[in-house]
Image (cartoon, coloured by chain):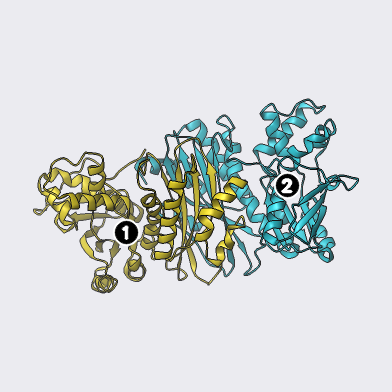
Chain colours: A cyan, B yellow
């Protein structure tokens, strides 16, 4: 830590670090006191020019950096406990740092996930924000990815594909559609600022056999969950929850479905629920005010996951998920 | 996570993730099971071109990335419990990744600090390695930075300034001295591969009132510890443990002392010990085979920390620590 870093911390981050475990950010370490629960740890980094654009609003960059991690915690059934931040900056600009730190603090308060510590380094290259977030679960109750069993229902929260459509709009790849400017703006917002489904965590913990968040595309992430569990799945395209704007966009060209189901950045919860627990899960989700949809079923075997149209015919996708590499 | 990232993880990092909490790296999250102890969390990032050089050996880059974090844990009195890794890479080269991952795995085993999870992202800019490490301490026993009291002894482990001298040698700033090539190489090695003092952690936890690791220069880090504690300190230059090569280098030019005591990258433990605990601390350190030296004393007041020569005169330093900003 240098004196320049000290100033940066004092000015922008100490006000955010009100949690006792942060020790006022004067220490090299943070403290997570034991309360007898297990700790779930997740880490996600976003890079300028790769995961966010240089002219993206700094407040949305901050929110996305934290929320992609919160999304992971939710899918594990965990309650947020705090996070540490690594910030690699090319330069420290007041008009970027101030809204970045303010939005980060706002989200930390909103989601009950306080800043505990971190490291700030200079870089000659693109800026990067890496967050490691912590959540708590009662001992032995973390929901894993590799526990899906044949016959279970595949359930997803919220709507799928909005963020991918938003990115396509931003990049001029969306093509013609009848959506309004407001609808386009809403899709872009879904891309820029994910909505982690925190209220769904207890229901996931109680009823889901396996879960993960959808970050790289529904079908690709489902394929990962199935591979980890040694099973396969069939998904009904007509059961996938598309928002009205996404549905309108899709209507014009059925080939567009790949963008929505393999596009990434949804940050919804994807989970498997035993059939005899499904109604209880849906009731708990409804109580938590998180919409959930049953979109298919886990099957025995390890064939590739399938997407089926209304006539039971497979819709072959050119790829299952988004890749940065 | 993308399929390219999946391959990278499967090939290089899954073999390292043998800890049950890593869940084989197939999940988005790692699990740290509660054993009733508090968790100490520390995070440090190193950037290519800033904290390591593009042609530094990849194995030493891996070791440094992990060890700077272990050094923080030791200074808090913690026993390593695991780490998560964020790797931002410009390109994936087999002849860099293989020795990097092998050395990381070797150190993880050596220090009992297993890989639990992480994130791998591509970057168009310099590579960066960010590690968040976890340690355990019995409840309520983490050693903080802000608990030093007037009258206590200032103690440091190992030797000070070797790494700074090594960096000066690497950068052609060391000037003339009578050291051998082997001595120069040893100094460079101290810069490249820190030696975290893991065996000292129990003694620090038992006897130190306040502690931190020396990463940005002895005098500057001591100033931070004193500022956090609301005290000051006087250090006897003649009591500072310099290695034989550093002493030889220093002998030629007394002005060189600033490089050694304000140069950074020592990764030794700096702590304060009440006088009536000092002999017990030294005995415990000796048992742990970690050399420690008493170099000065904490004083009341908040004046700047002072470095004194053999005649009690202040040695004024142009700066107290190394700054990347």
**With B300 as the anchor, is A8 left or right in this view?**
right
For the residue labelled by badge 2, is the local secondary structure a helix, a strand or a loop? helix
Q: How many marks?
A: 2
The answer as to whether the residues below labels 1 and 2 share one chain is: no
Look at 49% across and 47% down and name the residue there.
B87
Question: In this picture, is B79 found above or below A53?
Answer: below
Tell me where residue A274 appears, x and y as whole percent: 80, 64
Question: In this picture, is A325 found above or below B218?
Answer: above
What residue does disc 2 label? A218
What residue does disc 1 label? B195
Q: Is residue A197 visible?
A: no
Q: Nearer the viewer, residue B136 or B117?
A: B117
Q: Nearer the viewer, residue B207 or A255?
A: A255
Tell me where residue A292 appears, x and y as whole percent: 80, 52
For the residue labelled by badge 1, is the local secondary structure a helix, a strand or a loop? loop
Dot 2: chain letter: A
Tell me where residue A244 appears, x and y as whole percent: 83, 37
């Amino acid at each position: 830590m240098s004196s320049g870093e000290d100033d940066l911390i004092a000015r922008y981050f100490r006000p955010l670090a009100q949690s006792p475990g942060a020790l006022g950010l004067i220490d090299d370490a943070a403290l997570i006191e034991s309360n007898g629960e297990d700790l779930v740890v997740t880490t996600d980094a976003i890079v300028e020019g790769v995961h966010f654009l240089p002219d993206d609003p700094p407040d949305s960059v901050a929110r996305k950096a934290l929320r992609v991690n919160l999304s992971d915690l939710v899918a594990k059934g965990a309650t947020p406990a705090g996070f540490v931040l690594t910030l690699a900056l090319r330069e420290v600009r007041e008009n970027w740092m101030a809204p970045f730190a303010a939005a980060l603090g706002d989200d930390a308060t909103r989601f009950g996930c306080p800043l505990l510590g971190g490291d700030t380094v200079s870089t000659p290259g693109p800026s990067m924000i890496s967050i490691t977030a912590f959540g708590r679960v009662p001992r032995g109750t973390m929901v894993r990815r590799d526990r899906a069993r044949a016959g279970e229902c595949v359930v997803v929260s919220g709507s799928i594909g909005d963020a991918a459509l938003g990115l396509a709009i931003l990049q001029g790849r969306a093509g013609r559609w009848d959506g309004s400017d407001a609808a386009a703006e809403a899709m872009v917002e879904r891309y820029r600022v994910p909505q982690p489904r925190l209220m769904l965590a207890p229901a996931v913990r109680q009823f889901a056999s396996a879960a993960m968040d959808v970050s790289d595309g529904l079908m690709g992430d489902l394929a990962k969950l199935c591979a980890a569990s040694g099973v396969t799945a069939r998904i009904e395209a007509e059961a996938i929850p598309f928002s009205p704007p996404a549905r309108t966009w899709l209507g014009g060209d059925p080939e567009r479905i790949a963008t929505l189901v393999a596009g990434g950045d949804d940050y919804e919860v994807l989970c498997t629920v035993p059939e005899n627990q499904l109604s209880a899960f849906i009731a708990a989700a409804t109580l938590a005010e998180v919409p959930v949809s049953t979109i298919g079923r886990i099957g025995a075997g390890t064939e590739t996951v399938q997407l089926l149209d209304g006539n039971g015919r497979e819709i072959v996708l050119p790829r299952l998920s988004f890749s940065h590499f």
